[in-house]
Image (tube, rainbow, N blue to C red):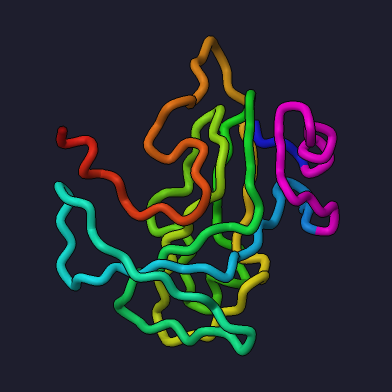
């Protein structure tokens, strides 16, 4: 079952932490997360799964940043989230999707116990100007049934910012 917005609000500081938290970003069954000003782009046109791929940082200026098609941008949420007993999931907002902007290409599923910022895989169908601080995606929470282990030591746990793919660590 998906938690209602009212239940998300009740769980703040208990089973769910969102920092900073603003009740105005709460929806009937989700919470809107905002885009941070920092982005990363891969330097090489060809990427290799078995190796770290170098990235270059970008900053979204106040006047916005025009995204190019055919290019992957890695962003992150302003909000830091943590959950101790719910499965977090991330989806783009419909208003963002209707502009042809994809916020997470494949990675919207989180693990119970995740603690960190959400790295966003941003891709656009046509050039679009984006702005830091925009409510770009929404997080929602599922109950989990049965015994479970929490995510504690994964590659992306306790991150401090945007994280490029660390798939290469799976090959060791």
From the viewer's perspective, is 89 left or right of 140?
Answer: left
Q: What residue appears at the point 49 percent right and 44 percent down from the top-left corner? A: 159
Q: What residue appears at the point 42 percent right and 49 percent down from the top-left corner? A: 107
Instruction: Determine whether 167 is above or below 15 in the image.
Output: below
Considering every residue shown, the one lying at the far top of the view is 147
Based on the picture, tell me whether residue 7 belongs to the magenta stretch: yes
Residue closer to the observer: 125 or 114: 114
Residue 118: where, in percent of width, then height? 53, 50
Based on the picture, tell me whether residue 75 belongs to the magenta stretch: no
Q: What residue appears at the point 58 percent right and 83 percent down from the top-left corner? A: 61
> Which quadrant of the figure contains the N terminus?
top right
Find the magenta span and give its range: 5-24
From the viewer's perspective, is 112 left or right of 102?
Answer: right
Instruction: Determine whether 113 is above or below 28 in the image.
Output: above
From the viewer's perspective, is 47 left or right of 139?
Answer: left
Residue 102: where, in percent of width, then height? 46, 67
């Amino acid at each position: 079952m998906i938690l209602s917005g009212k239940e998300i609000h009740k769980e703040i500081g208990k089973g769910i932490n969102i920092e900073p938290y603003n009740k105005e970003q709460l929806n009937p069954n989700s919470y809107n997360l905002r885009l941070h000003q920092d982005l990363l782009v891969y330097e090489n046109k060809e990427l290799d799964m078995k190796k770290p791929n170098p990235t270059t940082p970008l900053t979204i200026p106040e006047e916005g940043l025009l995204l190019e098609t055919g290019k992957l941008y890695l962003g992150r949420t302003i909000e830091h989230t943590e959950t101790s007993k719910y499965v977090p999931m991330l989806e783009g907002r419909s208003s963002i999707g209707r502009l042809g902007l994809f916020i997470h290409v494949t990675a919207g599923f989180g693990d119970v116990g995740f603690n960190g910022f959400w790295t966003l895989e941003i891709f656009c169908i046509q050039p679009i100007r984006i702005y830091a601080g925009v409510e770009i995606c929404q997080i929602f929470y599922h109950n989990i049934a049965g015994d479970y282990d929490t995510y504690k030591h994964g590659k992306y746990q306790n991150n401090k910012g945007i994280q490029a793919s660390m798939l290469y660590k799976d090959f060791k």
